[in-house]
Structures are given as structure tokens and as C-alpha cells.
Image: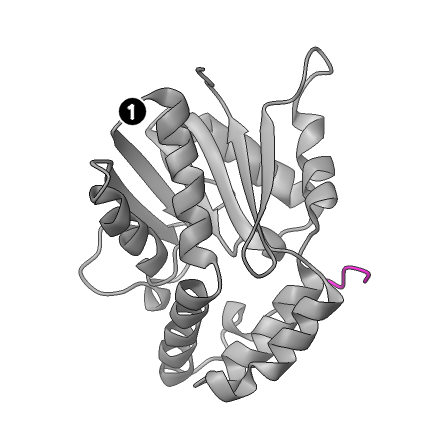
Amino acid sequence: MKRVDAPEILDSDACSARDVELSMLDLNGVNRRFGGVTTTQSLIERVALMTGQKCLSVLDVAAGSGEVPRLVAERLAQQNIRLDLTLLDRSRSHLAPGVRAVIADGLALPFRDASFDMVSSNLFAHHLSPPQAADFVKEALRVARRAVLINDLVRHPMHLALAYAARPLMRSRVAWLDGLTSVRRAYVPEEMRAAILPLFSSNGPPPIEISRHYLFRMGVIVWKNKRA
């Protein structure tokens, strides 16, 4: 299945406030039910294990309502792992009220070098071309002290079929149509690795871990300071 890049409705100015609200609710449901929350949780657990840190600061890029990092933080608190969250999104309308958030471009992070232990993203990478994905990782590594985490979809014909079948579960037609577009423009792990590899020299293995997760999700960890 060939990657087809196309714009998503929610990324435009064509959505009413009601469309945005319903789409955010639908995205939250998808993340809760179909691997979004558990994938990010697994990635952060891996970083906590490898670094030995129990308190980690996280910048979540393209955070939307921020439900994924919030739920992950609640779950990890039961393991005595504390997350200090900062959310970033390009649009104020995507963010839930009352959260600590920054409105900015995910490819030009308005932070100093090494400002956070981790920079994380969920369902952001498929919006980027391969050069943009590399630019994001480079910029995120600048801001991170430990690692960059990417949680995204895996493109697959069966995944597309499931996205079509999900229409009755969705409140918003916009979210459903964008879901179909998202699956078509998503990467497979080999493509994601190929996009990131040029950032690193050929001396030794690149500090990249890619794992597959429930229902066509991939998790990527790009290490900055890996410690066994």
C-alpha cells in the first residue's frame, strides 16, 4: 500500500468550533481504545527503565486536548513514576482549558536546548513529509535531554479497512474522514527509520528503537543520552 499524502480537514481553517470539539472527543476515544495511550506509556516506561529516573519532564508536541499524556501520567503515577507535562499545539482550539500549554510550531520549538527530559508526540509524524520528520526529530533532540518519542499509525490495508468500518463509532464525520487520510499518509517502520537515519553518522548503530504496538501503532525512541 503506497503512502498518499493529503491534507486533513482538522488542520485547516474549515472546521467549526463544534467540529473541532467533536473531533477531539473522537481522537481521545481512538487513543484510549486502540493503542494510543498504551503505546506512549510503553515508550516512557522504557525511558524510565533505561535512565533510572522516576521524575521526568515531558514536552508533548501536537498535543491536541492533552488526554494521552494526562492518562499516561495517571497510570505511571501508580508505578511511582512522575511526569511533569507541558503541552504544545499549533491551535488554542485543540487544547483543553486549564492545561499548561504553549501555542507554537512543532518544527520550531520555542525552548532552550535540553529543556525537557523527553519530547513526545502522538499522531503527529504522519502529518510530516520525510524531510520534515527528520527536521522534527532534530529539533526535538535539541530540546530533549534524554530521548524523543514518536507514537504514530502504521499504514496497512487492513488498518484502512478498520478505519472505514469505524464510522459508527465516530461522533464527527470530520474525524472519520481525517482518520482515513491519516492511515493513507502514515508511515511503516522501515520508512520512519529511513527518514531519521540521515541525522546520524555511520559510526556505530544509530540510537533508534522502533517497536510495533496494538492495532497498527508504532513506537519510536530516538535516544540522546542512553544509559544502560
Q: Residue at x 63, y 52 (%)?
A: 128
Q: Main secondary structure of the magenta part?
A: loop
Where in the figure is residue 109, as x and y percent of width and height?
Answer: 43, 39
Label 1 SS = loop
How packed mark 1 is, by other alpha carbons closer than 10 Å (few <14, some 14-19, many 20 or more), is few
Residue 113: tell me if it is visible.
no
The residue where tag 1 is placed is 53
Of 16 and 66, nearer the camera is 66
Residue 14 located left or right of residue 4: left
Name the quadrant containing residue 4. bottom right
Q: Identify whether 183 is placed above or below 168.
A: above
Residue 206 located left or right of residue 119: right
Q: Identify whether 13 is placed above or below 69.
A: below
Q: Quadrant of the N terminus?
A: bottom right
Q: Residue at x 71, y 69 (%)?
A: 158
Task: Farthest residue to the bottom: give it.
Answer: 168
Q: Quadrant of the C terminus?
A: top left
Task: Farthest residue to the top: give it.
Answer: 203
Where in the figure is residue 70, as x and y percent of width and height?
Answer: 27, 54
Name the quadrant containing residue 117. top left
Q: Residue at x 65, y 22 (%)?
A: 206
Task: Farthest residue to the left: give it.
Answer: 98
Where in the figure is residue 113, as x and y percent of width and height?
Answer: 39, 24
Residue 80: tell me if it is visible.
yes
Q: Amino acid at mark 1?
A: Gln
Q: Residue at x 68, y 50 (%)?
A: 129
Where in the figure is residue 82, as x and y percent of width and height?
Answer: 22, 37
Q: Indicate how the structure is coloured in the image.
A: one colour
Q: Identify whether 70 is placed above or below 144.
A: below
Q: Which residues are magenta?
A: 1-6
Q: Identify whether 178 is placed above or below 154.
A: below
The answer to if 224 sits in the magenta stretch is no
